[in-house]
Image (tube, grey):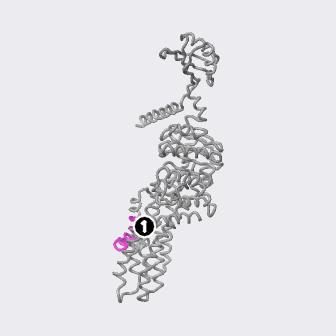
């Protein structure tokens, strides 16, 4: 659905996006994750034909963003960051205006507006459609923005920071809505909040300093972060040496370390990548009559990975600033 | 073309929501009203709107930039330009839509002055031909002024800057050139007389249909609309 090849974008003499390539299949919800200033919005702006690429190509639904810009724009719904509006327009008026720009008219337009209003919870308070957009709260503005991009039922939805500025309940609602869109739309959204992308998206693209740092499903990424899997076990009933030697005998286990935790022994078990010897450890403990108060597999957080990438970018940016100074 | 009209309608409707437009409209009608009753609507005076047309033309040097300044500057400032330009609408359609929208508002302003004409028909026998030519001249002058205002509005996201630049440009061609015709040395005054918007306009105000004026106003309109489209386009490349 979306195909980006060697895309590079410079703003004047500043590189914003540096030679990135990725592919998005139809029906996927892809999360663009990156620290502020990583090039997320720039990439989205190129995809939506707002900025042309400096070099490289991007195609959306089979149309090149540069050569067939109008076709691309017809197939895309784009909600920019901070969702800009004409504050003096009423919600209904605005939706009608945007629908007309999308070649919807008459009855078709009316149905489309009713449909998106319902879907984005705008039909609830009856006077909602008659309120000037400038008077709406942040959350409602965001809903209007989302309603607007869904008017023409586009094949591709591009949402730049869709949940920024929303309260927790609204964030959850927005998340559910976006997840629901994945059935018949291709969605690209950007965020600098990991938890959010992780929960909504089927695929993540982590971008830092204008380059793709990592790409894959959340699980794939997590595995990459973790390396070999790790168990934490706390046992009582034997001495450290016995614990270590018996657990080491389990296949897939690479190493075992013991530390004292009060009168319990805390063991850190390193296993092979993707291996999960929890059941074996439990069987062993029950067979030997050890007491167990903890047995868990350590899930490495993507958060750590993300923070690390962000940190690296900041270091890089710092070096660049020093170099150019 | 349809999208141009959709946008034009939105712009025109925008004027009737914004207080700025009402203030400008009221001021314009107030000043032209004072002018009319003070200079023209006097027993024994010639029943002609000509002095009023000339005064209105000078007022437009300041009024038009005030009504055009927000057209694109506001979109650039608030970021709505991003939603507008990622919709399936060409840059030319955007500019033409805005242009037609303002011309609509300009026509409403002018229509307000028809009251004066009606008063003259009630109390005298004004020359209808002169009145028609005068209004045609106002529309032509307006279209070239509006295109200048639209162009400067595309240049910056600051409305006031846009207004000041367009007042300057309009003042040069409407007032400055007249001074040059009067005071500049030989080749320059000749040159100035060809780009003096007011001479062309005054022919219309007198009731003359002058093709030189028609060509002058239409070509400047075309030029500045073209420049506006190019300026808008260039925003993508920066």
Residue sitting nearer the eye, A187 or B134: A187
Residue at 49 percent across and 59 percent down: it is: A131
Rendered location of residue A224, percent (x, y):
58, 29
The total number of labels drawn is: 1
Q: Quadrant of the C terminus of chain A?
A: top left
The residue that appears at 57% across and 16% down in the rendered structure is: A255
Query: Residue A172 versus residue A316: which sits nearer the camera?
Result: A172
Q: Point out the stretch of residues depicted in magenta.
A: B167-186
Using residue B137 as the reference point, say whether residue B90 is left or right of it: right
Was residue B168 drawn as part of the magenta stretch in this picture?
yes
Query: Neighbour class for label 1 at 10 Å: few (<14), some, many (≥20)?
Result: some
Q: Is residue A277 visible?
A: yes
Q: How far from the left and from the top, in percent, is residue A121?
A: 55, 52
Q: Nearer the viewer, residue A299 or B34?
A: A299
| Main secondary structure type of the part rendered in magenta | helix
Q: Magenta includes B235?
A: no
Q: Is residue A80 above or below residue B195?
A: above
User: Residue A43, position in %: x, y?
Assistant: 55, 44
Q: Is residue B65 visible?
A: no
Image spot of residue B82 (x, y percent): 51, 53
For the N terminus of chain A, the quadrant is top right
In the image, residue B228 sits, relative to residue A185, either above or below, namely below
**With respect to residue B139, does A320 lie above or below?**
above
Q: Chain of mark 1?
A: B
Element carrying mark 1: helix
Taking depth in this image into account, of B203 and A140 the one nearest to the observer is A140
Which residue is the site of mark 1?
B21
Quarter of the image holding residue A226?
top right
């Amino acid at each position: 659905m979306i195909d980006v090849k060697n895309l590079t974008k410079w703003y004047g003499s500043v590189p914003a996006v540096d030679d990135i390539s990725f592919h998005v299949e139809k029906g996927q919800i892809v999360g663009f994750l990156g620290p502020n200033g990583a090039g997320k919005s720039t990439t989205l702006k190129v995809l939506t034909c707002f900025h042309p690429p400096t070099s490289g190509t991007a195609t959306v639904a089979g149309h090149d963003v540069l050569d067939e810009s109008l076709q691309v724009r017809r197939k895309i719904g784009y909600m920019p960051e901070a969702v800009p509006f004409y504050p003096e327009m009423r919600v209904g008026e605005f939706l009608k205006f945007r629908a007309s720009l999308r070649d919807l008219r008459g009855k078709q337009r009316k149905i489309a507006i009713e449909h998106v209003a319902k879907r984005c919870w705008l039909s609830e308070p009856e006077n909602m459609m008659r309120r000037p957009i400038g008077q709406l709260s942040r959350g409602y503005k965001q809903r209007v923005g989302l309603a607007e991009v869904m008017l023409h039922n586009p094949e591709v939805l591009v949402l730049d920071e869709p949940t920024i500025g929303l309260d927790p309940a609204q964030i959850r609602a927005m998340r559910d809505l976006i997840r629901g869109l994945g059935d018949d739309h291709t969605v690209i959204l950007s965020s600098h909040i990991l938890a959010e992308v992780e929960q909504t998206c089927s695929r993540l693209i982590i971008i830092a300093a204008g380059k793709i740092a990592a790409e894959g499903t959340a699980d794939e990424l997590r595995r990459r972060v973790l390396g070999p899997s790790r168990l934490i076990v706390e046992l009582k009933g034997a001495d450290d040496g016995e614990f270590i030697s018996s657990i080491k005998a389990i296949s897939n286990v690479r190493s075992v370390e013991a530390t004292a935790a009060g009168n319990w022994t805390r063991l850190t078990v390193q296993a092979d990548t993707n291996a999960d010897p929890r059941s074996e450890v439990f069987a062993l403990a029950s067979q030997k009559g050890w007491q167990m108060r903890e047995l868990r597999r350590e899930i490495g957080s993507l958060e750590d990975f993300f923070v690390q990438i962000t940190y690296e970018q900041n270091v890089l940016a710092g070096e660049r600033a020093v170099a150019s100074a | 073309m349809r999208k141009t009209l959709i946008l034009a309608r939105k712009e025109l409707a925008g004027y009737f929501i914004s207080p700025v437009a009402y203030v400008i409209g009221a001021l314009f009608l107030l000043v032209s009203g004072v002018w009319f009753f003070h200079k023209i609507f006097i027993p024994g005076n010639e029943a002609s709107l000509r002095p009023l047309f000339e005064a209105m033309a000078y007022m437009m040097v300041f009024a038009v930039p005030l009504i055009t300044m927000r057209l694109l500057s506001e979109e650039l400032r608030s970021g709505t330009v991003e939603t507008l330009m990622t919709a399936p609408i060409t840059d030319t359609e955007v500019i033409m839509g805005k242009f037609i929208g303002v011309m609509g508002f300009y026509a409403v302003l002018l229509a307000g002055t028809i009251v004066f004409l009606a008063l003259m028909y009630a109390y005298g026998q004004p020359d209808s031909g002169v009145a028609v030519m005068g209004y045609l001249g106002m529309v032509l002058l307006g279209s070239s002024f509006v295109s200048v205002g639209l162009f400067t509005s595309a240049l910056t996201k600051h409305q006031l800057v846009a207004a000041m630049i367009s007042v300057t440009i309009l003042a040069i061609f409407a007032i400055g050139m007249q001074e040059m015709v009067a005071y500049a040395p030989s080749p320059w005054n000749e040159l100035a007389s060809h780009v003096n918007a007011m001479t062309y306009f005054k022919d219309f105000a007198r009731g003359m249909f002058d093709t030189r004026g028609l060509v002058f106003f239409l070509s400047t309109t075309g030029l500045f609309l073209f420049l506006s489209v190019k300026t808008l386009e260039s925003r993508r490349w920066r």
